[in-house]
Image: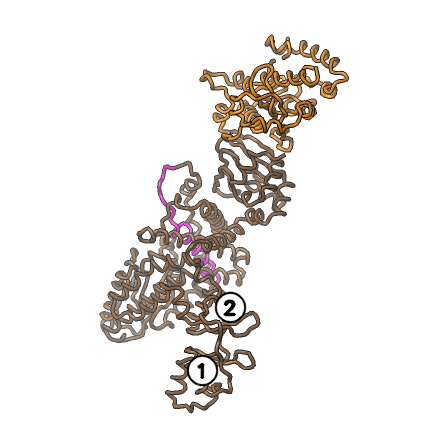
Amino acid sequence: MEVEEVRSFLAQFSPFGALEGAVLSYLSTKIHIRYFRSGSTLVEADAPNQLFSIVRSGAVELRIGGTELNHRLGEGQCFGYPSLLRGDRTRNQVVALEDTLVYQLDADDFLALHNEHQAVQDFFHSDETQRLRKAVEALRSDNEGKASQPMLGVPVRNLLRRTEVATGGPVMSIADCAAIMLEQNVSTLPICDHGRLVGIITDKDLRRRVVAKQLAYDRPVSEIMTLDPMTISGAEQALSAKLIMSRYDIHHLPVTNDAGAIIGVLSANDLLTRLGMNALHVVSEINAAADPAAVAQAAKKLTQVIVHLVDSGVDADHIARFVSAIGEAAHKRLIELAEAALGPPPIPYALVVFGSLARSEQAGGSDQDNGFILDDSYDEAQHGEYFAALAQRLCDGLNSAGYIYCPGDIMATNDKWRQPLKNWLARYRRWIETPDPDNVLNTTIFFDMRCVSGEAKLVDTLREQVLSWSKANRIFVSFIARAAATTRIPLGFFRNFLLEHDEQEGNALDLKHQAIAPLVDIGRVHALAAGLSPISTINRLSAACDADQISGEGSADLADCFEFVRETRFRHQARQIKAGKAPTNNLNPETLSSFEREHLKDAFRLIKTHLENISRRHAGGIS
Amino acid sequence: MSLAGSLGLPGWLAEPLWQRQWKKVVAEAKGTAMQGYYAAPQLAPDTPLGDVSIIALDFESDGLAEDAALLEVGWVTLRSGGIALSGARRRRIHVTKGLEAKAVTIHQITDSAAAEGAPEAEVLGELLEALNGAVVLAHFAQIEAQFLNTACQRQFGVPFLGRFICTKHLEEHWFPKVRAADGLRLGKLRAQYGLPWYRAHDGLTDAIACAELFLAQLARKDAPSLTLGDVLCPM
């Protein structure tokens, strides 16, 4: 017989709310109610467990096995299930923080419920990393449910303006094909042979390969067409089309159906129109800027780009790449403009960026971190003035464009970071061979470097040399591993963050330093320890997995975690921007949804575990 | 109501009296629908509480008078330190006479709803089966005892004799203090123990509410080796 009071309570909480009424009624008859005084232990750590529990009233604290982390659970939250799902002993101790009434299910009843209902399975994924993965998906689908169109998430076929596609054949003449293009008013013509796409021609091809070369118009089009063009399935997301176009610098992409037949041609313009205000627009605007003021004006649209991408349901990794593309464009254009004003550089040099921009992981509100690696032919007396002036123009321009001066003075305007290659090498060598434990944290940013302009070879040489030194130097690796492990998630704050009743400190969560930086550190430690060349965190994690530094599972978990914390940051920044504020990394935990809050806890736990792992592995267990 | 209860005798004196009464009623019940209930073995007062089967019980009625009509009964089982909802029941009782307006507004049970219930004898029969060998738990147990006794007399011509635990009584005796006039009401006590507020006032919800209060009292008492005798309410 259903117990209405219990049933209606369960229905308010996930995952029970998703269950049918009859299931909930049945469930209400399977429950045991227990009461625990504040301070009493509900579950012992490392003990057999046969009960699944839901907090009905009061609060309990999970003391997470082997760590100092505590996790507070309140009304409607569940515990005791990981051990049931694993069929193993408990890991965590559960203590009542207040007088607590709990609803409990026997293991058999819980497992039956779990096995029969997908919603329950999704919710109680046996480990938190799985839950994190689900959380990212849920965030995204949540986004899609909103009024704002998920523009980059729509299938490519929905973006095609024409339902019928004109094609030419390989044996047709250039003139005939041009006639079709004129008649159909298209700038691109796919060339098909017996229904199969074999090539493509564009207006540009006609100009470059025919008119300019005075090629006879009666030649077969096969002589001028681009062979085997890249295509995309109509079912793919617009985002994928966008990435292919950016990566391969193409503006027209034939779209195919499931059978491989052409259903249309997607143009970059179609996408731009669709997206309206968009990251690449800003990049184009920066590239076309006539002076630093115009660069600044364009770059300031970055905030709107973030809002737009977040609202479009674009994943954090791609948002970061778009944001980084804008940052990179600003650097490139400003240095071009500076060179145009000062004259060409007297000797080869590279503009190198460090940190998040180097990793293509920039978010809103980034400062600048850059330097010049000069060719070893550098002569202070002869070239010093030029590069100092160049640096000044670059850094001033960046500051005006919203990339504020680096508070740590890591900028090309600083003599220290405007040096010939040999000096850069000597400095890195010193960092690696005689590491200073007090200073190691301040140098880690330099181990993420990328050339954005000038002689890329200078940066490549430096990076390769640095990796070969770091890989061979276990002491250095142990120092940076130790430094990473000490950048702990501040437990005092964390506790406060979890204990919602505790309102004493109104301080914020620093997503950059407390959530994102530790993950970046983990990627960097692996890269330096194994001499891995990738710069972005995701690529470093996957390379670390290939090099057997971490397990495939560990790598995937960290990548998901990284995605989740960055997604949280971008969503936070989008909210700030919409509210007319400048984007920051500081988040008031009260503004988090309970969903984000729950999963941030999972993320913190995962980060903690992996920091401990690298500490064990590389720092001899000292942390 | 039993003689011992009406005299409010202390346990050491009440027990032998109660045993004699029990024997007497067992004889009376022979051949009636209550024979089964009275055939159950008697638990000694020194039985550990953990071995006692307890049924939390609550009647909804149209008043508190001796002849009040019972509208509904809810009950739930306490087992090994918890409440087992598998043993939860809520039964409506078919009433023929007009309901008193005031009680109706409290319990939200209307004439027509009450008319849909099962005959009183049938509901009592099911309840007696659950109570077989068990101890009754209620908040202000005297009232429930009176209801049960009157109903059994009415339907079967046999009094109801049973052992009762009363959460109101336990609170007064275990945790004596100066209280407001309504300080011993179920809802007030529950709030003090951090127990949730329940919207509904039906027999089953109130029975569960009382059972939860009992668990909270036991947890606060924190006496691991309680016996049945320690918690029984002198009737």
Which chain comes out brown in the rendered image? Answer: A
Q: Is residue B44 above or below residue A84?
A: above
Horizontal and vertical percent position of residue B77? 63, 28
Q: Quadrant of the N terminus of chain B?
A: top right
Q: Read off the magenta span.
A: A503-531
Q: Position of residue A198 (x, y in %)?
A: 52, 80
Determine the CA span between mark 1 and mark 2: 24 Å
In the image, taking residue B204 as reference, residue A531 lies left or right, namely left
Taking the image as shown, residue A338 lies to the left or right of residue B107, namely: left
Q: Around disc 2, counting alpha carbons within 10 Å, would you say few (fewer than 14), some (14 to 19), or many (20 or more)? A: many
Q: Chain of mark 1?
A: A
Residue visible at 44% across and 74% down in the picture = A252
Q: Amino acid at mark 1?
A: Ile
N-term mark: 1 or 2: 1
Q: Nearer the viewer, residue A46 or A324?
A: A324
Quadrant containing the C terminus of chain B in the rendered view: top right
- Residue A510: in magenta span: yes
Write down the chain letter for disc 2: A
Residue at 45%, 60% (x, y): give it.
A537
Residue A406, compared with residue B146, is above or below; it is below
Chain identifier, colour orange: B
User: In the displayed structure, would residue A567 be above or below residue A54?
Assistant: below
Q: Which residue is mark 1?
A: A180
Find residue A397 and report its horizontal and vertical position in percent. 26, 64
Any part of residue B78 in sight? no
- Res. A148 in view: yes
Please name the residue that numbered disc 2 is placed on.
Answer: A234
Residue A309 image point, x, y percent = 40, 59
B100 relative to A513 in the view: left or right: right
Nearer mark to the viewer, of 1 and 2: 1
Q: Are marks 1 and 2 on the same chain?
A: yes
